[in-house]
Image (cartoon, rainbow, N blue to C red):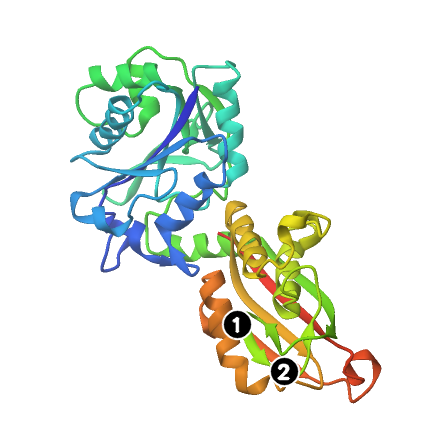
Amino acid sequence: MTTAAIIVAAGRGTRAGGEMPKQWQPLAGRRVIDWTVAAFEAVEAIDRIVLVLHPQDLDRFPPRGRVEVTTGGATRAESVRNGLEHLDAIGGDDPVSYILVHDVARCCTKPATISAILYEIQTGATAAAAPALPVTDALWRGADGLVSGTQDRAGLFRAQTPQAFVFSDILAAHRTHDGDAADDVEIARAAGLPVRILDGDETNLKITHPDDFNRAEKILRDQMDIRIGQGFDVHRFGPGDHVVLCGVQIPHDRGLQGHSDADVGMHALTDAIYGALAAGDIGRHFPPTDPQWKGAESHIFLRHAVDLALEKGFSINNMDVTLVCERPRIGPHADAMIAALSSITGVTPDRISVKATTSERLGFTGREEGIAAQAAATLVKK
């Protein structure tokens, strides 16, 4: 049973202003389309995500992971049908059973909202469902800038997306529909399909006019998931002629002892990322009792933590490592360490800090019995 989502993003959005279509405009540090796609990527129950793009925009969002790209049409209805036909054509041995259709301009949609709508379809509660908000304002009719009458608001709703359907039903409805439509509920109802109204969300706004960007940015910043983790590690000195710190080999009259390569800085940073994810520590993922990790290079651990963060929908905003030792001197190697950490994690060097301090000859680091490290990492939900 495959579940898919279509994100309609082929329009030009001229009412929103700007030098480019609204889906490609920046918003809270990302593009509008990036926020929308990320919300659907965060829902694990969705197997395929189809972006329907204008022919001129196909290179703006290369396919990745579960995200596929196809070309839109001249109208919204034609674009949705193109997405449906794309899914039907390459359904293979596991054709799509359920489909969500969403407007790219609704970039504040929460993953929890998407999951709740999908649940209604997957449990068989209904064959079609869509969120909406009851109209609460007084409604007027107008002509020539004057109020010409009033309209009863009883039973009126403001429609939202995503709208969910049994795939075969909505595909058949689109194939028999002639002309455009305001949304897919209109097409479903024209085909005789009943559509259940679900509770909408006031924050699930659709960017239509220039002022909507400011509203959307406030909503997105208010719902950002920001995590901060910290890590601490210690390794003692023993026989050797070098130490490995933050991925850089430094000549020294002794080496650091440990089950792996004893890179104390990278271990602390790895634990900081695990901590931000509430995912334990290195020992949970790479037990020291397991002989396969004997002498392992610590970039394996750090990369695993980074991949786990990405899998859970987080990007690493910045990282900070402090090494505590009397010797060796860290300053001459700090840039190389930053470069090594950047290469492993994909975080740009301007977001990575590596620095050192001494303990003023106090404690085990002051007696040069070992090296300690502490690290912090900030993760932001994508």
Percent position of residue 280, x then y: 70, 50
Horizontal and vertical percent for residue 167?
35, 19
Label 1 close to label 2 by CB (< 8 Å): no
Left or right: 178, with 358 as reference point: left
Amino acid tagged 1? Ile
User: Which residue in the protein does label 1 denote?
Assistant: 352
Hey, which quadrant is residue 138 in on the image?
top left
Q: Which residue is mark 2?
A: 252
Q: Is residue 29 above or below residue 219?
A: below
Residue at image location 63% in from the left, 68% down from the top: 263
Residue depicted at x 36% and y 12%: 193
Question: Foreground residue, 31 or 252?
Answer: 252
Mark 2 neighbour class, 10 Å CA radius: few under 14, some 14 to 19, many 20 or more: some
- Total marks shown come to 2
Does residue 53 appear to the left or right of 382 in the view shown?
Answer: left
Mark 1: secondary structure: strand
Q: Residue furthest right?
A: 363
Sooner in the amino-acid sequence: mark 1 or mark 2: 2
Q: Image quarter for residue 241?
A: bottom right
The answer to whether 362 is drawn above or below residue 60 in the figure is: below
Circle number at residue 221: none
Q: Residues within 10 Å of mark 1 (few under 14, many from 20)?
A: some
Residue at the extreme top: 192
Nearer-the-camera pick, 252 or 200: 252
Q: Is residue 315 visible?
A: yes
Q: Quadrant of the N terminus?
A: top left
Camera-nearest residue between 93 and 102: 93
Give percent across and percent down for residue 173: 27, 16
Q: Amino acid at mark 2?
A: His
